[in-house]
């Protein structure tokens, strides 16, 4: 599943981000979006974009189009 598929309040662990632009992936890596890092979906804007997430104690707004490239495994 992808980060964009999560529901508000769900948590997941990052598996792969290799399908996105290298420059954007590098920025996300610097913000703590590392393999096996936990990501919590806080909220979604009223029109469905952007998404507010917490990863490595950083609150970040991500475009839904970018979140569609982040492969995650839902927390059980």
Image (spheres, rainbow, N blue to C red):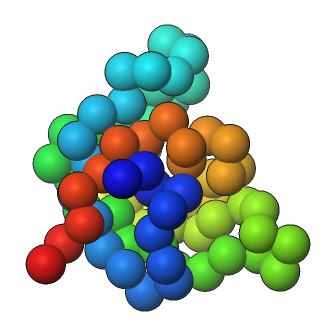
Residue visible at 15% across and 48% down in the picture: 36
Horizontally, residue 29 falls left or right of residue 4, namely left
* Quadrant, the C terminus: bottom left
Residue 55's quadrant in the figure?
bottom left
Looking at the image, residue 20 lies above or below residue 17: above
Q: Is residue 48 left or right of residue 42?
A: right
Which of these two is toward me, 40 or 56? 40
Reply above or below: 57 against 43: above
- Give the residue drawn at x 60%, y 80%: 43
Seen from this angle, which residue lies furthest top? 22
Q: Is residue 39 visible?
A: yes
Q: Position of residue 53 (x, y in %)?
A: 50, 67
**In the displayed structure image, the side of residue 5 where residue 45 appears, left or right:** right
- Where's residue 54, x and y in %? 43, 68
Quarter holding residue 26: top left
Q: In this orientation, does residue 57 appear? A: no
Residue 52 in the image: state x and y as whole percent.
Answer: 60, 69
Residue 19: where, in percent of width, then height?
A: 45, 21
Which of the pair 45/73 is nearer the observer?
Answer: 73
Q: How many marks?
A: 0
Residue that lies at the very extreme toward the bottom in this rendered image: 9
């Amino acid at each position: 599943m992808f980060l964009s598929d999560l529901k508000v309040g769900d948590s997941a662990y990052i598996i792969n981000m290799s399908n996105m632009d290298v420059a954007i992936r590098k920025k996300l890596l610097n913000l703590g979006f590392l393999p096996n890092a936990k990501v919590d979906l806080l909220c979604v804007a009223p029109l469905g974009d952007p998404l507010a997430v917490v990863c490595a104690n950083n609150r970040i707004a991500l475009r839904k189009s970018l979140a569609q490239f982040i492969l995650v495994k839902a927390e059980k």
